Image (cartoon, grey):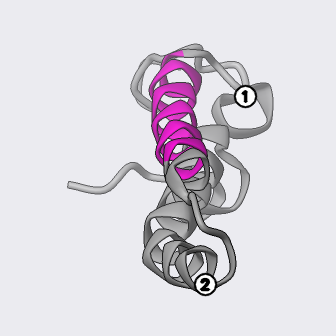
Amino acid sequence: MLVHNWRTVLRHAWSVRLMVLALLFIVLEPVINFVAATWVSRDLYIQLAMSAATGLFAAAAIVARIFVQQKISGELNGKPPAEG
């Protein structure tokens, strides 16, 4: 079941934004590793940086998910719309 304001959540929630960044890093990682392997003799640091950035964005999204965002939740503070 979707939340009642799912369009607003997709546009404004930091957890969604951070997960999009993590997804972008996951998709770009093989491309950047291939390019780095052809230009740089040791691309281990680039692989580590890409993996670390992906992990950090995913972890930040988890943390952002538990915080109330006034722009999205308004005065509900985590309560269902009927009770808010």
Q: Which residue bears the numbered disc 1?
A: 74
Residue plotted at (44% across, 64% down) = 26
Disc 2 crowd rating (10 Å Cα; few below 14, some 14-19, many 20+) is few
Q: Among all residues in the image, which is located at the extreme left?
A: 1
Residue 35 placement, left or right of 54: right
Whether residue 61 is situated above or below residue 17 in the rendered picture = above
How many numbered marks, from 0 up? 2
Q: Earlier in the sequence, mark 2 or mark 1?
A: 2
Whether residue 29 is situated above or below residue 62 in the rendered picture = below
Residues 29 and 65: in front is 29
Span shown in magenta: 48-66
Circle 2 SS class:
helix
Tell me where residue 28 appears, x and y as whole percent. 54, 75
The prevailing secondary structure element of the residues shown in magenta is helix
Q: Which residue bears the numbered disc 2?
A: 35
Residues 15 and 38: in front is 38
